[in-house]
Amino acid sequence: MAASSCRFALKFGRLKCLNTANTWLTTRLLSSLPKESQHVAPRYDFVDKYDFAIYARGPGSLKAKTIEAARISIVRKTKTRQMWKIEATTPVTKKPLGSRMGKGQGKVDHYVAEVKEGQVVFQFNCENETQASEAFRLVTFLLPMKLYLRKRPPTNKILWTEF
């Protein structure tokens, strides 16, 4: 019997087959289905001082070390110090290796920046687009999330261009 002949019902966040004859169809979690959006509307459209901005395509968390490594790669490629970056403000604790369970919370191990979909991660100035796109390429290797680069328009009326 084809899978299309089975009627599905949503119950407690799961898809279930209603026909008793199709018991071989297993329940499937809705969260396992692909939900990737093609275009993400930026949360922060305004960029006052900077020519280029790197936005996040999806949510995630960035460690302070990875943010600093990406900042250094941008500075090396664009040869500019004029930039803005996201700050890692959320502490993450960790128990020492070999310690037993209990006895309270562990010490602060590192700091993390919680990034939302469409949020600005970096903003920077650059002389030309080729340097900016090369810096963006290096940043995509370092950060564990999907990103996109936007260029500021010459006037405020024109929409930003993505590339």
Image (cartoon, rainbow, N blue to C red):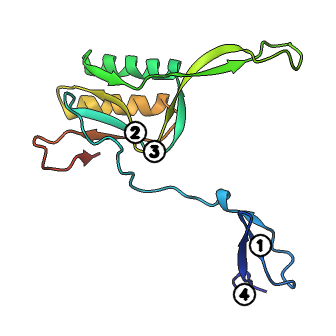
Q: Which mark is residue 125?
A: none
Q: Residues within 10 Å of mark 2 (few under 14, many from 20)?
A: many
Q: Position of residue 116 (x, y in %)?
A: 47, 40
In the rendered image, the residue lying farthest to the front is: 104
Q: CA distance from mark 4 to mark 1?
A: 13 Å
Assign the N terminus to one quadrant of the image.
bottom right
Residue shown at 87% from the left, 19% from the top: 102
Instruction: Find out whether the residues at labels 4 and 1 contact each other: C-beta distance under 8 Å.
Output: no
In the picture of the structure, the residue carrying the numbered disc 3 is: 117
Residue shown at 35% from the left, 32% from the top: 136
Q: Nearer the viewer, mark 4 or mark 1?
A: 1
Q: Position of residue 152 (x, y in %)?
A: 20, 39
Say which element carries label 1: strand
Say which element carries label 2: loop
Count of all numbered marks drawn on residues in the image: 4
Instruction: Find out whether the residues at labels 3 and 2 contact each other: C-beta distance under 8 Å.
Output: yes
Q: Residues within 10 Å of mark 3 (few under 14, many from 20)?
A: some
What amino acid is found at the position of numbered circle 3 in the picture? Glu
Q: Which mark is residue 16?
A: 1
Say which element carries label 3: loop
Q: Which mark is residue 119?
A: 2
Q: CA distance from mark 4 to mark 2?
A: 43 Å
Instruction: Find out whether the residues at labels 3 and 1 contact each other: C-beta distance under 8 Å.
Output: no
Label located before the other in sequence (3 or 1): 1
Q: Nearer the viewer, residue 46 or 125?
A: 46
The reply, left or right, for residue 21 in relation to residue 27 is: right
Q: CA distance from mark 3 to mark 2?
A: 6 Å
Say which element carries label 4: helix
What amino acid is found at the position of numbered circle 4 in the picture? Ser
Instruction: Give the quadrant of residue 103.
Output: top right
